Image (spheres, rainbow, N blue to C red):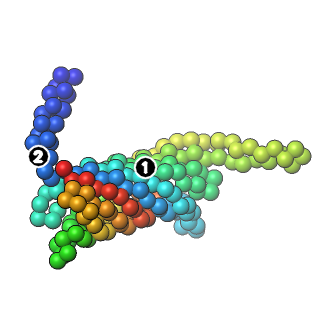
Amino acid sequence: MKKLLIATTLATFALTSQAEGLYVEGDLGVSRMVASPDNDHTIADTIFDQRLSLGYDLGNQFRLALDYTNFGQAKLDEYRVKVKSIGVTGFYDFDISNKDLVPYVGARIAYNKANITESDFYCNGYSQNCHTYTLDSYSKSRIGIGALGGIQYKVSSNLSINTGIEFNLMASDLSQGGIKLGLRYNF
C-alpha cells in the first residue's frame, strides 16, 4: 500500500510539472452498434455514447489520449448489450494555414467489456399480461481497434470544440460507428 501511495504521489508531481501539454476532453455522440452473430444476418441499434479522455500533446502534431467510453445499451434482437471501453488513441493533428481549425486523424486500441442479457417476451393471450423474462446474462471482454477523424475549433487558447466520426471494431462480431461532439480543455 505504501509503494502504491509513493508511486501515485511521484506520478502526480511529474504530471503537474509537465501540465503544459495535458488536456481533458469530454465527448457525447450518437452511434450505430452492429452485431453479426452469423453470416446470414446483421442486427443494429442506435445508441447514445459518452467518452472522457485525458491526453498529452507530444509536440510535432502528435497527441496521445487515454479514454473511458460508455457506449450505452443496444437492443439487438433478444439481446441487450451494454459496452464499456478503456482505450488509448494516437492522434495526428494536421497543420493548416488557419490556426483556429485543426483537422485530425487517429487510431485507437481498446479493452472492451460487453454485458449481455438475453431475454424473452411472453404474453398471456387470455389476460393480455405481458412479461419480459431474463434467460441468460453474461459478459465478454475483447481487445478492439478503431479509427477516427474530425476537426477542432479553438474557442480560446485553452478551450476547443471538437466534432468527429469514428469506427470501432469491438470484437469479431460487434462494431460501432458514429459521430461525436465535445469540448477539450488544455492546461
Q: Residues within 10 Å of mark 2 (few under 14, many from 20)?
A: few
* Pointers 2 and 1 in contact (C-beta within 8 Å): no
Q: Secondary structure at mark 1?
A: strand
**Image quadrant in which you'd find residue 127:** top right
Compared with 131, 144 (above or below) is below
Looking at the image, the residue that sits furthest to the top is 2
Q: Amino acid at mark 2?
A: Gln
The residue to which callout 2 is attached is 18
Among the two numbered marks 2 and 1 on one chain, the one whose residue lies closer to the N terminus: 2
| Residue 54 badge | none
Q: Nearer the viewer, residue 97 or 142?
A: 97
Q: Amino acid at mark 1?
A: Asn
The residue under the point 53% across, 61% down is 46
Q: Nearer the viewer, residue 25 or 173?
A: 25
**Residue 4 placed where, x, y %?**
20, 28
Q: Secondary structure at mark 2?
A: loop
Looking at the image, the residue that sits furthest to the right is 126
**Residue 158 placed where, x, y %?**
21, 56
| Residue 70 badge | 1
User: In whole angstroms, how far apart are the C-alphas of marks 2 and 1?
Assistant: 29 Å
Task: Tell me the mark number nearer the camera, choosing from 2 and 1.
Answer: 2
The residue under the point 25% across, 53% down is 185
